[in-house]
Image (spheres, rainbow, N blue to C red):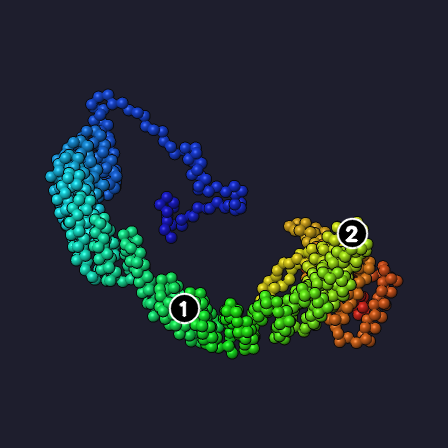
């Protein structure tokens, strides 16, 4: 090992000792770097006072000051030569000292370092212009644009300076040199504007000629033409447009050029030229790219053309579009609808019929109703057009007949077509033909809508006998349709045949299958209420409650009894509520039972007494929060979820075993509280520890028995937070019986003889404890001594005599176990408690 220079030779280097940190806990108040910086800023610890102001009184002090500042600037430049800011500060300071030569020297040195820096050139030229050194400034600009010809800012400053000096020739010369580099479009416009400021129109035209060749876009050609138009050169402007059309040709046609050309001719009131331009462009530009062109053409025709011309323009364009669409997809029925609507608004009858025939010829390829829904409206519109517009009734009848022949009625049908056909015959005063159509429809493809339409037609004609026959056929076709039964009964009620209506209702509720039975029963009950037959209503409610125990039925029944006038109406309603409460006691949906009790409470508040209201309030449930397991669709556990359950007082009285769980929970909370108090402290008294251990074993046994009983329950896990804290003797006896039943469930193979022997051993053990309570207490104390001795042996403080006495006590303990004392102690949890 290398030796140290200061120590004795040959001795190893001694490593200094590191101070040990005694307290490694974090400080109670943590300070961040941000807080340190903020405090430093607030206290202004790093703010240096400004230097004192120095007044220079003579030339010597001035030179000393200048020398010091120059030394500072030179040092800064020497430290960071590439930082242009240091050079600019140095040059600006020299300029402030009126040392222009020195300032130029600094700028020249900076240019040698970074000659591509535009800011440096601009500052240099600004210094020269500020000090009226024009030739120097021109020299700087010439050097700058020679080195950086693409720096447009330098060119702009240069031409601006020449124009401010009214050096028009020099400025124009600079622009010409700039345009040789073909800059962006805006700088060409600046050159044009410069010439226009000095009324040089011919020079501006020449610049535009060069400009449209350097940047040949449609927009630039349009600007050139508008320039000529703005200065009154109409022929030149038209010539520019014509040259642009020739320049782009038919391969690169743009609608913007033709729109601008047409508007120019429109301003010149050359409307024939405008139409020629629009037609020329529309014939050569694709339709999807000429939307603005056609729009401008339409506006022009609306302003300067006649109506026929305008409509022809619009219709011809739209016809062409629709023809393209239907050619691309003949089954695009929406395109056919738009096309036909256009022709119906402006077209002959023959043209419309031709397009209708072409449209209905495109039958859907598959016999599925969803593909036919749009197609069938072509036939409907065709028939309505023939009837309303063409006024051809025979052709209308032929259209409906052809449509009914096309539809595959064996797979599906459209009731709308049948009804429209029948209504058309009714409008033609052909009732026989209308009945024939509807009868044919019902016979071939019966549907609810057809029956309803036929019945409505006969009702309008006041043919009630035919309506009865149709209702009978309708109910034979669909006996589960409750609406049909109700409408039939209402018809009979309107006609005054109450018995017939009641018979219809009886026949309806006797059907084995109904789609909306609740609506049918409600209608029947309302019918009897209108007939003022309360006894029949009660019978109906009784029959309905035999089929369903829905809470709304009970509430409706009770409210009906309350609505029937009488002295005992509240008593009758209360009786119904009591029956409903008993019937819903075993219902899984406890919310329904709660709804019933709430409705009962509302009734008692309105028409009951204080005692009856108090009785209902006692029946109101208690809402508790519970937890239950959640399983996914594949049977996997998905954790637990919380939900609210309702515990009714009547149900709570039938569950006395809740007290056992309450005792177990109370013991567990007490044990956790004691353990928290004694955590971190050393136990000085061994006897107290042994007693606590014995108490813990007894409590753990009781908790284990409670958990086993809890797992055997079929219901969900019960929240015992609101259960009784004080257990009665009756509850203890029931807990013992429950524990015994649990043990029998765990050991079902045990025969009756073994049970009798267990009972005898229990009796003998209890008698022995009653006769010699001292001996049992001494045995328990000996058991505790044995546990103490075991701990003392672990600590190394036991003796040989104590070990021999423990062996004797162990033998006695085994004898007592064989005698059945421990079994009795395990069986009866409440005794240990």
Are discs 2 and 1 less than 8 Å apart at CB? no
> Element under label 2?
loop
> Element under label 1?
helix
Q: Is residue 678 visible?
A: no
Residue 602: numbered disc: none
Q: Relative to residue 695, is residue 263 drawn left or right?
A: left
Position of the C terminus, as image quadrant, is bottom right
Q: Which residue is mark 1?
A: 333
Q: Relative to residue 35, is residue 802 drawn left or right?
A: right
Residue 581 quadrant: bottom right
Mark 2 Cα within 10 Å, few/some/many (few <14, many 20+)? some
Distance CA(mark 2)–CA(mark 1): 68 Å
Image position, residue 809 (x, y; %): 78, 64
Q: Which residue is mark 2?
A: 608
Image position, residue 305 (x, y; %): 28, 54
Residue visible at 19% across and 34% down? 127
Image position, residue 403 (x, y; %): 46, 74
- Front one among 64 and 238: 238
Q: Residue furthest top?
A: 57
Residue 480 quadrant: bottom right
Residue visible at 38% across and 62% down? 345
- Front one among 175 and 112: 175
Sequence-wise, the earlier of marks 2 and 1 is 1
- Front one among 371 and 714: 371
């Amino acid at each position: 090992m290398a030796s140290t220079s200061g120590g004795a030779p040959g001795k190893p280097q001694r490593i200094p000792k590191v101070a040990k940190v005694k307290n490694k806990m974090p400080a109670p108040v943590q300070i961040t770097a941000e807080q340190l910086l903020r405090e430093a800023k607030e206290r202004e610890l790093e703010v240096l006072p400004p230097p004192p102001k120095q007044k220079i009184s003579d030339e010597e002090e001035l030179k000393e000051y200048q020398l010091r500042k120059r030394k500072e600037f030179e040092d800064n430049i020497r430290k960071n030569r590439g930082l242009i800011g240091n050079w600019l500060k140095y040059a600006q300071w020299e300029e402030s000292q009126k040392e222009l030569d020195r300032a130029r020297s600094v700028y020249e040195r900076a240019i040698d370092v970074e000659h591509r820096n535009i800011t440096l050139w601009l500052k240099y030229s600004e210094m020269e212009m500020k000090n009226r050194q024009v030739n120097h400034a021109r020299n700087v600009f010439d050097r700058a644009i020679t080195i950086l010809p693409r720096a447009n800012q330098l060119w702009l400053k240069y031409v601006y300076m020449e124009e401010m000096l009214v050096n028009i020739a020099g400025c124009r010369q600079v622009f010409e040199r700039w345009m040789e580099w073909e800059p962006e479009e805006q700088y060409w416009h600046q050159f044009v504007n410069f010439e226009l400021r000095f009324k040089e129109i011919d020079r501006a035209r020449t610049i535009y000629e060069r400009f449209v060749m350097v940047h040949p876009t449609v927009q630039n050609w349009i600007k050139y033409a508008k320039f000529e138009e703005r200065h009154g050169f109409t022929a030149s402007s038209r010539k520019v447009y014509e040259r642009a059309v020739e320049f782009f040709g038919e391969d690169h046609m743009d609608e913007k050029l033709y729109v601008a050309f047409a508007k120019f001719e429109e301003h010149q009131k050359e409307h024939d030229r405008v139409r020629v331009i629009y037609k020329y462009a529309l014939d050569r530009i694709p339709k999807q790219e000429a939307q603005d062109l056609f729009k401008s053409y339409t506006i022009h025709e609306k302003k300067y053309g006649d109506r026929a011309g305008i409509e022809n323009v619009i219709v011809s364009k739209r016809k062409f579009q629709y023809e393209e669409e239907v050619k691309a997809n003949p089954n695009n029925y929406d395109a056919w609808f738009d096309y036909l609507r256009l022709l119906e608004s402006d077209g002959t009858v023959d043209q419309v019929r031709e397009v209708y025939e072409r449209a209905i010829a495109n039958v859907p390829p598959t016999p599925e109703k969803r593909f036919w829904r749009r197609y069938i409206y072509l036939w409907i519109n065709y028939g309505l057009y023939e009837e309303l517009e063409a006024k051809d009734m025979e052709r209308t009848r032929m259209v409906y007949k052809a449509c009914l022949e096309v539809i595959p009625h064996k797979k599906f049908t459209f009731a709308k077509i049948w009804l429209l056909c029948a209504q058309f015959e009714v409008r033609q005063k052909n009732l026989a033909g209308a009945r024939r159509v509807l009868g044919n429809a019902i016979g071939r493809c019966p549907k609810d809508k057809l029956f309803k339409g036929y019945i409505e037609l006969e009702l309008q004609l006041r043919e009630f006998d035919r309506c009865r026959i149709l209702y009978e056929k309708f109910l034979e076709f669909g006996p589960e349709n409750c609406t049909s039964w109700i409408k039939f009964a209402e018809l009979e009620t309107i006609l005054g045949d109450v018995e017939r209506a009641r018979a219809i209702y009886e026949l309806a509720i006797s059907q084995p299958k109904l789609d909306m039975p609740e609506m049918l029963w409600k209608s029947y009950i309302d019918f009897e209420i209108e007939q003022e037959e309360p006894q029949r209503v009660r019978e109906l409610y009784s029959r309905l409650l035999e089929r369903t125990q829905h809470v709304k039925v009970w509430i409706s029944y009770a409210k009906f009894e309350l609505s029937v006038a009488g002295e005992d109406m509240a008593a009758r309603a209360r009786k119904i509520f009591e029956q409903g409460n008993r019937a819903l006691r075993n219902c899984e949906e406890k919310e329904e039972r709660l709804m019933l009790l709430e409705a009962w409470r509302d009734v008692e508040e309105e028409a009951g007494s204080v005692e009856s209201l108090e009785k209902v309030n006692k029946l109101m449930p208690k809402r508790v929060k519970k937890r239950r397991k959640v399983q996914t669709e594949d049977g996997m556990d998905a954790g637990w979820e919380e939900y609210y359950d309702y515990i009714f007082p009547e149900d709570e009285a039938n569950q006395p075993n809740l007290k056992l769980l309450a005792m177990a929970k109370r013991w567990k909370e007490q044990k956790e509280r004691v353990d928290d108090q004694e955590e971190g402290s050393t136990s000085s008294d061994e006897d107290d520890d042994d007693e606590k251990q014995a108490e813990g074993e007894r409590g753990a046994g009781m908790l284990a028995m409670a958990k086993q009983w809890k797992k055997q329950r079929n219901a969900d896990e019960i929240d015992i937070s609101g259960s009784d804290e004080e257990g009665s003797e009756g509850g203890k006896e029931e807990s013992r019986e429950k524990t015994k039943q649990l043990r029998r469930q765990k050991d079902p193979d045990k025969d009756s003889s073994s049970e009798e022997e267990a009972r005898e051993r229990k009796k003998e053990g209890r008698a022995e404890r009653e006769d010699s309570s001292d001996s049992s207490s001494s045995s328990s104390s000996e058991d505790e001594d044995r546990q103490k001795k075991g701990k003392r042996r672990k600590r190394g403080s036991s003796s040989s005599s104590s070990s021999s006495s423990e062996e004797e006590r162990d033998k006695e303990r085994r004898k007592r176990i064989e005698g059945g004392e421990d079994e009795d102690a395990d069986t009866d949890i409440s005794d240990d408690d």
